């Protein structure tokens, strides 16, 4: 055999070294091998973290996807998730839609829940031993979800603000070797009173002598199945609550489907309006607006149910003015000047009737004068002059939000006698004439 020359031996050794390098490289990197300190990379094309839903479902039948939540009551919604990856996933809170009224807490499900389907985890209530960690939007802290673990993102709220509100949390989701993902969790809410009424305001047809009107109010709760109502006697005994009648579960379900609202518990409550009672008590003549209250038995923080009833009582005096029947409209005027109207006429069929302003019930910014019409020989017509005093009222009136402006009306005491009226004489009835306007400033 021919011996290799030195150059040939060097070439042979180099070829062997190259072959060993190629084989080692292929085994290590092309056949899936990795160095001992390498961690597995995420696999699959799905999301880094799978949520059961990212928008909380609305109430059944609510096409807008809105959940009715109790006003003034804290609550939360749990968004179930699972990490289907072979590597841990880290969560970081980027922002809350309302940093003042919401918070986000994260927690892991028990280890033996890892075999459950995500639907089942979402259906179950998180157990009491979950270690909830509240996260802050202005913190660099991250929450780690181990490989193949499950858990919840709990979006909580304080419920202090009434009305519609979108509650949300923006999360940053990261895993080694994968691009970061943005995740937004939302609850479309409407914060409503613990107990609501329908109608909230009712308008009656005219009431004449001896008339009665019966109303029925539907009172329900979207958050409480068990509550009771206690009708409160009002200042005017002509408005009489009846006994509340509780609805069955089947009736509540029917009302929920009809009204497109969640109805967990409900009552029907009758209210009867009497023009006069057997003891002689009467409603004032003219337009009225009565506030009726139903107390809610239970925690002291539950607001009562408040409804209003409006209407007009017709009787022996008719109010006539160019602006319309039964009321006086002042329009807009300068508060510092005030305003006066003297074109209101009062007519009656009673010859022995006397009308006297009731200063005790008329607001102090209103002043009324009434006098017989000198041109009317029958003595059955009066002229009414109403003045808004300067610098005594500001803005629109009446205004139900301002106690001093809730009842803006001129009250006239009605006496049926031809002689002089003494201080001890009791009026036969009272006439109420609403007054409205807008006191502006330069």
Image (cartoon, rainbow, N blue to C red):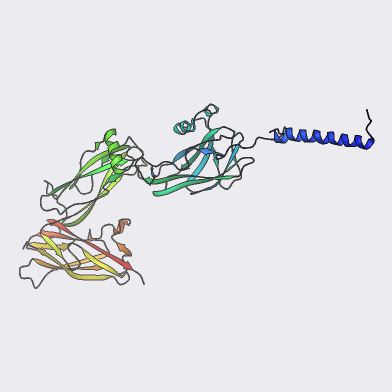
Please indicate, yes or no, whether residue 300 appears anywhere in the rendered image. Answer: yes
How many numbered markers are drawn? 0
Please indicate, yes or no, whether residue 232 appears anywhere in the rendered image. Answer: no
Q: Give the residue at the far front of this rendering.
A: 1
On screen, 308 above or below 105? below
- The N terminus lies in quadrant: top right
User: Relative to residue 134, is residue 347 drawn left or right?
Assistant: left
Of the pair 411 and 45, the residue shown nearer to us: 45
State which quadrant residue 66 falls in: top left
- The C terminus lies in quadrant: bottom left
The residue depicted at 50 percent of the width and 28 percent of the height is: 116
Q: Position of residue 201 (x, y in %)?
A: 25, 50
User: Relative to residue 397, is residue 4 drawn left or right?
Assistant: right
Of the pair 28 and 272, the residue shown nearer to us: 28
Q: Position of residue 68 (x, y in %)?
A: 37, 43
Of the pair 272 and 102, the residue shown nearer to us: 102
On screen, 195 above or below 290? above
Q: Position of residue 150 (x, y in %)?
A: 53, 33
Q: Give the residue at the far top of this rendering.
A: 112
On screen, 59 above or below 113? below
Q: Position of residue 421 (x, y in %)?
A: 11, 61
């Amino acid at each position: 055999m021919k011996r290799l020359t030195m150059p040939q031996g060097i070439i042979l050794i180099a070829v062997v070294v190259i072959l060993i390098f190629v084989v080692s490289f292929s085994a290590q990197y092309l056949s899936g091998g990795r160095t001992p300190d390498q961690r597995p990379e995420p696999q699959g094309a799905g999301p880094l973290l799978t949520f059961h839903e990212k928008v909380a479902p609305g109430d059944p039948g609510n096409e807008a996807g809105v959940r009715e939540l109790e006003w003034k009551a804290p609550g939360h919604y749990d968004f179930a998730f699972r990490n289907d990856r072979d590597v841990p996933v880290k969560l970081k809170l980027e922002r809350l839609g309302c940093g003042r009224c919401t918070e986000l807490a994260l927690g892991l499900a028990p280890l033996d829940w890892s075999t459950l389907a995500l639907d089942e985890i979402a259906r179950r209530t998180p157990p009491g031993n979950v270690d909830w960690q509240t996260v802050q939007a202005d913190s660099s802290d991250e929450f780690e979800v181990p490989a193949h673990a499950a858990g919840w993102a709990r979006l909580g709220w304080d419920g202090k603000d009434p009305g519609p509100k979108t509650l949300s949390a923006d999360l940053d989701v990261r895993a080694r070797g994968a691009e970061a993902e943005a995740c937004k969790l939302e609850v479309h809410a409407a914060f409503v009173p613990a107990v609501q009424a329908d109608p909230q305001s009712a308008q009656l047809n005219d009431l004449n002598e001896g008339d009665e009107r019966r109303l029925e109010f539907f009172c329900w709760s979207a958050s409480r199945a068990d509550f009771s109502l206690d009708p409160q006697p009002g200042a005017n005994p002509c408005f009489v609550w009846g006994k509340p009648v509780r609805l069955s579960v089947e009736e509540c379900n029917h009302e929920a489907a009809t009204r497109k609202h969640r109805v967990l518990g409900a009552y029907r409550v009758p209210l009867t309006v009497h023009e006069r009672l057997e003891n002689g008590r009467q409603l004032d003549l003219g337009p009225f607006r009565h506030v009726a209250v139903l107390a809610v038995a239970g925690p002291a923080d539950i607001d009562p149910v408040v409804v209003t009833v409006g209407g007009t009582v017709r009787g022996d005096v008719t109010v006539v003015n160019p602006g319309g029947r039964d009321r006086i409209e002042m329009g807009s005027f300068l508060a510092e000047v005030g305003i006066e109207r003297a074109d209101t006429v009062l007519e009656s069929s009673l010859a022995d009737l006397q009308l006297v302003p009731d200063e005790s019930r008329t607001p102090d910014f209103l002043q009324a004068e009434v006098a017989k019409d000198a041109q009317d020989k029958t003595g059955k017509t009066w002229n009414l002059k109403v003045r808004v005093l300067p610098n005594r009222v500001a803005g629109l009136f009446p205004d139900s939000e301002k106690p001093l402006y809730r009842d803006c009306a001129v009250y006239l005491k009605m006496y049926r006698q031809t002689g002089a009226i003494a201080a001890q004489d009791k009026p036969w009835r009272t006439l109420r004439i609403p007054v409205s306007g807008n006191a502006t400033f330069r």
